[in-house]
Image (tube, rainbow, N blue to C red):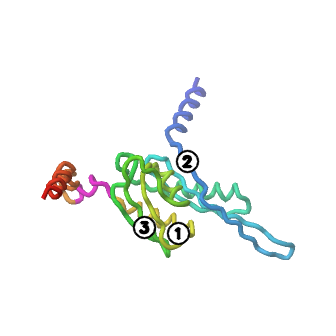
Amino acid sequence: MAERDNNRRGNRRDRDEAPEFADRLVAINRVSKTVKGGKRFGFAALVVVGDQKGRVGFGKGKAKEVPEAIRKATEQAKRQMIRVQLREGRTLHHDMEGRHGAGKVVMRTAPEGTGIIAGGPMRAVFEMLGIKDVVSKSIGSQNPYNMIRATMDGLKKEQSPRAVAQRRGKKVADILPKRDEAPAAEAATEEA
């Protein structure tokens, strides 16, 4: 009976500990070293991991075999995850820029139904993060490592209205623009 209880506890612990993470292989690079007997190959993998509910991370791994490089990259990505607040669970709260080295990325919020408008490595980050609508542009470096680092830099800068209001000691309603007044003001200027 004690053995059965231990199994139950172990299974419950496994379910609670390991939330499901999705991963995406962004780039794999083969490098060769010429030695006396010929060439030795090594592989470097770049992986993005996320729970598609606001957490994302990336990692790189190097090994003599591709699967081992991917495993190392995935483990590193899980250790380096960040949490990003999403608006309505589908887009960013505000527009932002991210930089790393020569890489620069611009990310903008988008209305519902826009989809993910992003290239290669940035698309992988947004999909693993769980963003459904975003418009982004990569300016500068096309290196996938720099693009992902620039994207992560921009995502770290994002702040939700609740966090800004709390920091300023105001209410969320005071921070956000009034939606009802904006169309009325536009209609008044069109009539004049």
Mark 2 or mark 1, which is nearer the start of the sequence?
A: 2
Q: CA distance from mark 1 to mark 3?
A: 10 Å
Q: Is residue 105 left or right of residue 76?
A: left
Magenta segment: does it hold 27?
no
Is residue 171 at least partly visible in the picture? no
In the picture of the structure, the residue carrying the numbered disc 1 is 146
Q: Are marks 1 and 2 in contact (CB under 8 Å)?
A: no
- Residue 162 percent location from the top left of the image: 27, 52
Which secondary structure, mark 2? Answer: strand
In the picture of the structure, the residue carrying the numbered disc 3 is 98
Is residue 89 at least partly visible in the picture? yes
Circle number at residue 22: 2
Q: Can you name the residue that lies furthest to the right here?
A: 37
- Residue 161 percent location from the top left of the image: 27, 54
Q: Is residue 142 left or right of residue 130?
A: right
Which residue is rendered at x = 22% and y = 51% of the image? 172
Q: CA distance from mark 1 to mark 2?
A: 22 Å
37 is higher (above) or lower (below) than 119: below
Mark 2 or mark 3, which is nearer the start of the sequence?
A: 2
- Residue 72 percent location from the top left of the image: 63, 57
**Which of the two residues, 123 or 73, is positioned nearer the viewer here?**
123
87 is higher (above) or lower (below) than 138: above
Quadrant of the rendered structure where residue 31 is? bottom right
- Residue 3 percent location from the top left of the image: 60, 28
Q: Classify mark 3: residues with Cα within 10 Å, few (<14), some (14-19) or many (20+).
A: many
What residue range appears in magenta? Answer: 159-167
User: From the image, which quarter does the N terminus lie in?
Assistant: top right
User: From the image, which quarter does the C terminus lie in?
Assistant: bottom left
Q: Is residue 30 left or right of residue 10?
A: right
Amino acid carrying label 2: it is Ala
Which residue is rendered at x = 56% and y = 35% of the image? 10
